Amino acid sequence: MKARVKLAVASYVIAILIRLGFGLRYLTARALTSYHIAAIGTAWSDLPRAYQILFLAMIRGGGSGMLAVAVAGAFLLAYPFRKGENWSRWALLLTGLTIDVSMTYVALAVQMGTPASTPWGVPAFGILLDVLGFALSWPGRSSLDDLLTVTR
């Protein structure tokens, strides 16, 4: 495997692990995070039970989406990407960008509209990783290969 493809795989794996972590964190949440609490300006224990259920359902829904994209990405990377199927590069890029762009947008909207300080940089970093993985896995020789190839 070429060095640039190994870097592409590393980029995709990091993005997948970030999504997996956030997905599991949100999917298994028993309460809102500190930035969610800051956004609504009310202590978790002061919220009516119906609101708690609704808020948890929303963040678990987001967590489910992140987890689904992480699992899909891991599958794409392990099978079709590894076999060199070009369509898998596009699938990795588009699934990753779909979740990362939407999560960045949501986090920035909450941060700009409330007193909360959200972790918007994490999904924004995912966008960078998605694009980097896609670019590095481009078929054919590039000048990047020359930089990464150890001269004999």
Image (cartoon, rainbow, N blue to C red):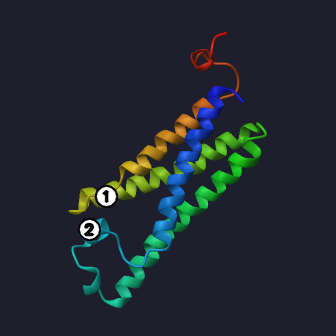
Q: Residue at x 25, y 86 (%)?
A: 46
Q: Secondary structure at mark 2?
A: helix
Give the position of the C terminus as an image quadrant: top right
Tell me which numbered mark, 1 or 2, is placed earlier along the sequence. 2
Choose between 17 and 128: the one closer to the eye: 17
Kindly identify which residue carries mark 1: 118
Marks 1 and 2 close (CB-CB < 8 Å): yes
Q: Amino acid at mark 1?
A: Thr
- Based on the displayed image, in which of its 4 quarters is residue 51 positioned? bottom left
Residue found at the very far top of the displayed protein? 152
- Give the label on residue 39, or none: 2
x then y, percent, for residue 109 = 32, 57
x then y, percent, for residue 8 = 60, 35
x then y, percent, for residue 47 = 28, 85
How far is the residue under mark 1 from the one under mark 2?
Answer: 9 Å
Q: Amino acid at mark 2?
A: Ala
Choose between 151 and 76: the one closer to the eye: 151
Residue found at the very far front of the displayed protein? 152
- Give the label on residue 9, or none: none
